[in-house]
C-alpha cells in the first residue's frame, strides 16, 4: 500500500553526508497538503522522501484525481521527468508532514551516470513500480471492488495507517459515494 525504499533512503543519507556531494543535496520540510510536484509543470529537481507519506496522483480532464501510489521513506519523485526531460506526468502531495532530500535534475543525472550503485537502486525502483502498477491494474480488472476493498483495508490495518475516504476512493478509482456503499455492504455481510 505505502511504498518504501530503504535502500535508496540509506544511500541518500550517506550521499548527503559525503564531502563531495554534501552541498548538492538539501533537506526540506513540507507540511501536510503541500505539493512537491505539480502535474504538467516543469520540475528542476527530484525528491527522495526522508520521512512522512505523500500521494502520487493524476488529475484527469474531468477534474477527478486518481491516486497511483502512496509513497513513504526512500521513495523518489521527479526521476522520470529528470530522465526523460519532460513536464511532470502527475502531482505529488504530502499527506503528513514530510521531510525530503532534494537535488537538481542535473545532479541526479550525474549520480545516475557516474555511480553504479545509485543507478542500480534507481533501475530496481523503476522496475518495481512497473511491476506494482501491472499488478494493481490486473487486480482492478479481475476482481470486483467488493473483493478488493477488504484486501485494501487489511493492508492499511497491517501498516497501522488511516486514510481519508476521499484518498481511498481516489486510489480505487471510484467515487466516495461508491466507497461508502461498499463499506456499508462489507459491514452488513460481516454482521450477517
Image (spheres, grey):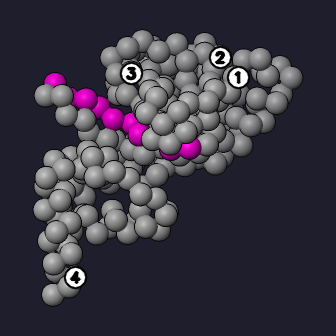
Which numbered disc, 4 or 2, marks the residue closer to the eye? 4
- Residue 177: where, in percent of width, then height? 13, 52
Badge 3 is on which residue? 38
Which numbered disc, 1 or 4, marks the residue closer to the eye? 4
Badge 2 is on which residue? 107
Q: Is residue 4 left or right of residue 57?
A: right
Q: Are marks 4 and 2 in contact (CB under 8 Å)?
A: no
Name the residue at 17% across, 59% down: 180
Disc 1 from disc 3: Cα separation: 21 Å
Disc 4 from disc 3: Cα separation: 41 Å
Q: Is residue 126 visible?
A: no
- Residue 104: where, in percent of width, then height? 60, 15
> Does the magenta-highlighted stretch encompass residue 55?
yes
Q: Earlier in the sequence, mark 4 or mark 3?
A: 3
Q: Are marks 1 and 2 in contact (CB under 8 Å)?
A: yes
Badge 4 is on which residue? 190
Q: Secondary structure at mark 2?
A: helix
Magenta range is 52-61
Badge 1 is on which residue? 25
Q: Can you tell which quarter of the image residue 46 is in?
A: top right
Q: Secondary structure at mark 1?
A: loop
User: In this orientation, which residue lies closer to the viewer: 124 or 139?
Assistant: 139
Q: Are marks 4 and 3 in contact (CB under 8 Å)?
A: no
Name the residue at 21% across, 75% down: 187
User: In this orientation, which residue lies closer to the viewer: 60 or 87?
Assistant: 60
Q: Secondary structure at mark 4?
A: helix
Amino acid at each position: 500500500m505505502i511504498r518504501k525504499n530503504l535502500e535508496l533512503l540509506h544511500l541518500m543519507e550517506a550521499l548527503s553526508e559525503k564531502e563531495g556531494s554534501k552541498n548538492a543535496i538539501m533537506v526540506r520540510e513540507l507540511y501536510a497538503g503541500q505539493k512537491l510536484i505539480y502535474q504538467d509543470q516543469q520540475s528542476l529537481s527530484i525528491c527522495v522522501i526522508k520521512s512522512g507519506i505523500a500521494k502520487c496522483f493524476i488529475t484527469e480532464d474531468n477534474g477527478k484525481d486518481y491516486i497511483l501510489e502512496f509513497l513513504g521513506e526512500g521513495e523518489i519523485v521527479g526521476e522520470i521527468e529528470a530522465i526523460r526531460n519532460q513536464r511532470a506526468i502527475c502531482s505529488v502531495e504530502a499527506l503528513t508532514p514530510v521531510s525530503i532530500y532534494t537535488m537538481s535534475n542535473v545532479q541526479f543525472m550525474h549520480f545516475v551516470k557516474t555511480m553504479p550503485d545509485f543507478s542500480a537502486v534507481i533501475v530496481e525502483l523503476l522496475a518495481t513500480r512497473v511491476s506494482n502498477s501491472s499488478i494493481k491494474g490486473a487486480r482492478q480488472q479481475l476482481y470486483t471492488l467488493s473483493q478488493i476493498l477488504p484486501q485494501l483495508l487489511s493492508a492499511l490495518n497491517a501498516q497501522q495507517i488511516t486514510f481519508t475516504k476521499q484518498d481511498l476512493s481516489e486510489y480505487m478509482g471510484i467515487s466516495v459515494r461508491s466507497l461508502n456503499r461498499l463499506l456499508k455492504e462489507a459491514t452488513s455481510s460481516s454482521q450477517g
